Image (cartoon, rainbow, N blue to C red):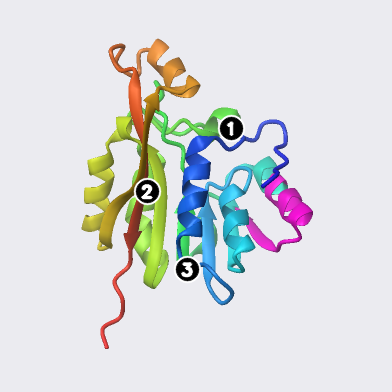
Amino acid sequence: MKLVTLPGVFAPISDSWMLADAIRQETVDPGRHALDVCTGSGVLALTAAERGATTTAIDVCRRALLTVRLNALRSGLRIRTLRGRTFAPVAGERFDLIASNPPYVPSPRPDVPRRGASRAWEAGRDGRLVLDALCDAAPAHLRPGGVLLLVQSSLIGTDTTLHRLRRAGLVDVEVRACVRGPLGPLMRAQQAAGTIPSDVDQEDVVVIRARAPRRRK
């Protein structure tokens, strides 16, 4: 997949490609509805649309949404793009698949940046501001049997996410993929700023899968 990434839009790295691979393992075909939250360049939305799903992409960044539209045009795909935070633009809608590579890098600031490129990765002091909001709200936007796919770093608590998703009512919650490696440049920068302990030099990047309960017959 060849992508155009406009200046100021975060280009996909290994975690996005891990999540794209996970999407390809799901039943995403014509007649299904997919949602990419925090879409960035649109790699997840494009992956779902390539499989034939009716696809929506959400981001707070106008330039990111323009990037998605450009990439969809280049690929001959149709993707609905909406501007807003997490699920606000799709209130009342439900999907068969929700995928998200949210901001998850810890930051010295207590909140999420309102502007600038760092909106794509900074997520509060514990790195969980956006992720927790996704975990809590996703069940209301999944169709019965619908699947949620998330990617995150182990540095912000893999078990915390698993427990939160189960508490929210999702089932079959599991780590679907895990890759261990040295800290990336964004995590190293925050480590230099004192946000991440200095003795940490490795992290696991994990894809988490959860499912909404199916309707009882």
Q: Position of residue 164 (x, y in %)?
A: 25, 50
Q: Is residue 86 visible?
A: no
Residue beneath label 2, please?
133
For the point 57% across and 60% down, the residue is 48
Q: Secondary structure at mark 3?
A: loop
Q: Quadrant of the C terminus?
A: bottom left
Disc 2 residue type (three-letter): Ala
Question: Residue tagged by mark 1?
Answer: 115
Instruction: Give the number of callouts.
Output: 3
| CA distance separating discs 2 and 3 | 25 Å
Q: Is residue 18 above or below residue 35?
A: above
Rendered residue at 51%/58% (across/down): 24
User: Which amino acid is tagged 1?
Assistant: Arg
Q: Amino acid at mark 3?
A: Thr
101 lies left or right of 172: right
Q: Earlier in the sequence, mark 2 or mark 1?
A: 1
Q: Tell me the crowding category of disc 1: few under 14, some 14 to 19, or many 20 or more residues within 10 angstroms, Cα based.
A: few
Q: Nearer the viewer, residue 33 or 16?
A: 16
Q: Nearer the viewer, mark 2 or mark 3?
A: 3
Q: Residues within 10 Å of mark 2 (few under 14, many from 20)?
A: few
Q: Which residues are magenta?
A: 67-83
165 left or right, relative to 23: left
Mark number, residue 27: 3
